[in-house]
Structure formats: C-alpha cells, structure tokens
C-alpha cells in the first residue's frame, strides 16, 4: 500500500513559497493514536520523494548535524544530478513512476510504501492509479501561498480522523480522478 503521509497548513500548503517548513517545525505534535507517524513509519519498507523534498532534508541534516533518518531504501525522483547521503540507501530515478513503484514494492518485502513528498509527485502516483491513501496532519497555520498539498483533481473517501497535539489528522482512501473528470 502506498500512503502519502504528510503535514499541511489549514489552507493546503506543504511549504511556503521559499520551500521553508519553519511553520511545521514549531508545531507541537501528539503521540500515539491510530494515525501516529512513528507507528506508521515502523511499517514502511520503502519510500519515495521528489528532489525538492530531498534537497530540503539534506539541507536540514547539514544544518542540524543529524543523520539520515530513514532505514528503508528511498527513491528520489529527479531529472537533475544530486549527491547521495553517505550511509543512506538512496536510489535516484527519473521518468514514469510505475517502474519505481514496482521496484519499491519488491524492496519493501511485504511492508508498506511511503510517499514522503511533494504534492506534484504524489499526484503523479495518483494519476497512475498507484496512490492508495492520503494521511494528512493539518496544522493550525495558513500561509496564503506555497507548495500545494496535492495539485490534482481527485475523489477521496474519509476513513478516519483524530486530534494529535496541535494537528487534526485524517486518513483518506484515494478513489481516483474526480468523478466529473472521468470519461
């Protein structure tokens, strides 16, 4: 199962126009509950992210001195030449997301798949019929502009909600393209 598990502002942005996540890093998260991120992460066998997300993570690690936080193999979708993080299982890919999903599924060995970010990449997986669910933690912040959560027209089904610290968390099943757009 491929899950886009992410945080967003109340007005639907992942990052501000400068790709900053300062708004997110100052939020108080909760612990426990069925939508707990750490519990989710323990069941993940492979991850995928876009190049902007990857560069943000690498820059954040450089600034904080922290190590790569993910033990599972991680694909980075990019058309550019990016440097891998030493000691991390990073696999760079370009083009169609279908072969990447296939490789992730094989590497995950029965565990779930995580769509880390960003929104456009999640949309590509959704358009290919490969995105199964969206789990979003909504922070009590509005930005007015920035990187959108999921810039696609999709029908979703609400499965579950709960509060977690400052966040309202929701799990949605991806049903497919917006009904009005289906041919």
Image: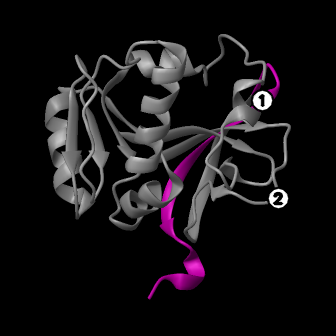
For the N terminus, the image quarter is top left
Label 1 SS: strand
Label 2 SS: loop
Q: Which residue is mark 2?
A: 144
Q: Are marks 2 and 1 in contact (CB under 8 Å)?
A: no
Would residue 1 appear left or right of 40 to someone viewing this image? left
- The residue that appears at 70% across and 50% down in the rendered structure is 16
- The residue that appears at 37% across and 58% down in the rendered structure is 125
**Camera sees residue 3:** no
Main secondary structure along the magenta-highlighted residues = strand
Q: Nearer the viewer, mark 2 or mark 1?
A: 2
**27 vs 98: above or below:** above
Q: How is the image coloured?
A: one colour
> In the rendering, at what x and y percent does residue 135 appear?
58, 39
Between 160 and 61, the one lying in front of the other is 61
- The residue that appears at 34% across and 55% down in the rendered structure is 130
> In the rendering, at what x and y percent does residue 164 appear?
75, 21
Crowd rating for badge 1 (residues with CA inside 10 Å; few <14, some 14–19, many 20+): many
Would residue 141 appear left or right of 149 to someone viewing this image? right
Q: Earlier in the sequence, mark 2 or mark 1?
A: 2
Circle number at residue 142: none
Magenta part of the chain: 163-183
Question: Quadrant of residue 64 in the image?
Answer: top right
Q: Is residue 137 magenta?
A: no
For the C terminus, the image quarter is bottom left
- The Cα atoms of the two marked residues, 2 and 1, are separated by 18 Å
Q: Which residue is mark 1?
A: 167
């Amino acid at each position: 199962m491929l899950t886009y598990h992410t945080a967003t502002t109340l007005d639907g942005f992942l990052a501000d126009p400068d790709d900053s996540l300062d708004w997110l890093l100052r939020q108080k998260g909760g612990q426990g509950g069925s939508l707990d991120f750490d519990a989710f992460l323990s069941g993940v066998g492979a991850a995928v992210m876009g190049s902007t997300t990857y560069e943000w993570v690498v820059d954040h690690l450089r600034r904080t001195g922290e190590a790569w936080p993910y033990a599972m193999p991680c694909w980075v979708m990019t058309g550019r030449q990016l440097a891998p993080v030493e000691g991390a299982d990073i696999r760079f890919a370009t083009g169609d997301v279908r072969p990447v999903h296939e490789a992730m599924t094989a590497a995950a060995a029965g565990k779930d798949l995580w769509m880390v970010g960003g929104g456009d990449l999640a949309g590509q997986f959704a358009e290919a019929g490969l995105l199964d669910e969206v789990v979003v933690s909504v922070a009590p912040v509005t930005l007015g502009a920035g990187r959108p959560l999921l810039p696609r027209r999709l029908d979703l089904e609400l499965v579950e909600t709960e509060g977690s610290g400052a966040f309202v968390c929701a799990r949605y099943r991806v049903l497919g393209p917006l009904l009005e757009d289906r041919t």
